Image (spheres, rainbow, N blue to C red):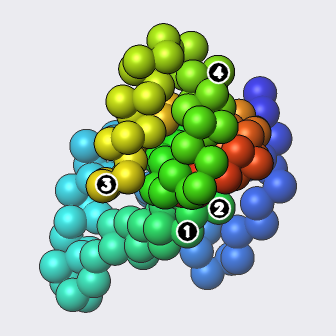
Amino acid sequence: MAEEEKKEEIKIPEKFKNIVQEIEKMSVLDLAELVKILEKKFGVSAAAPVAAVPAAASAEAPAEEKSIFNVELTAIGEKKIEVIKAVKDITQKGLKEAKDLVDAAASSPQMVKENVKKEEAEEIKKKIEAAGGKVELK
């Protein structure tokens, strides 16, 4: 019933009424064939404008809507023990595992936690930076 209401709302100019009536009588296969013929006849593509819009929207959306992050320890700082304690608390790992992770971060960035929500990632970053380490959210 909603479709019928929408059809009533659309005002078709007099010059297009016959064409619209003919199109309404066609099957989906006939319409698809008609579109292909019109594309060839006029050298246009009905799909191009439709495909361009989602591509532009998807290019912008991930940057704005990123909600899952990986937390990477990039530097230890001068308070290594404090950073180890923070990493141990955050990762729920044992002392040795936390120490190994922090020691490895001295030479190359190490992943502290993966696939966390933005709020949790920000909280982890604050804890490690308060302890003297440096963190990157990716």
Question: In terms of secondary structure, where does tag 2 sit?
Answer: helix
Give the alpha-carbon distance from disc 1 to disc 4, as whole Å: 36 Å
Give the alpha-carbon distance from disc 1 to disc 2, as whole Å: 7 Å
Question: In terms of secondary structure, where does tag 4 sit?
Answer: helix
Q: Which of marks 3 and 1 is in front?
A: 3
- What residue type is disc 4 on? Asp
Q: Quadrant of the N terminus?
A: top right
Give the alpha-carbon distance from disc 4 to disc 3, as whole Å: 21 Å
Residue at mark 4: 89
Q: Where is residue 138 in the image (x, y as percent from the top left)?
A: 49, 53
Residue at mark 1: 60
Residue at mark 3: 108
The reply to whether discs 4 and 3 touch (Cβ–Cβ < 8 Å) is: no
Residue drawn at the location 61% of the way across and 68% of the way down: 17
Residue at mark 2: 64
Q: Which of marks 2 and 4 is in front?
A: 4
- The reply, left or right, for residue 104 in relation to residue 13 is left
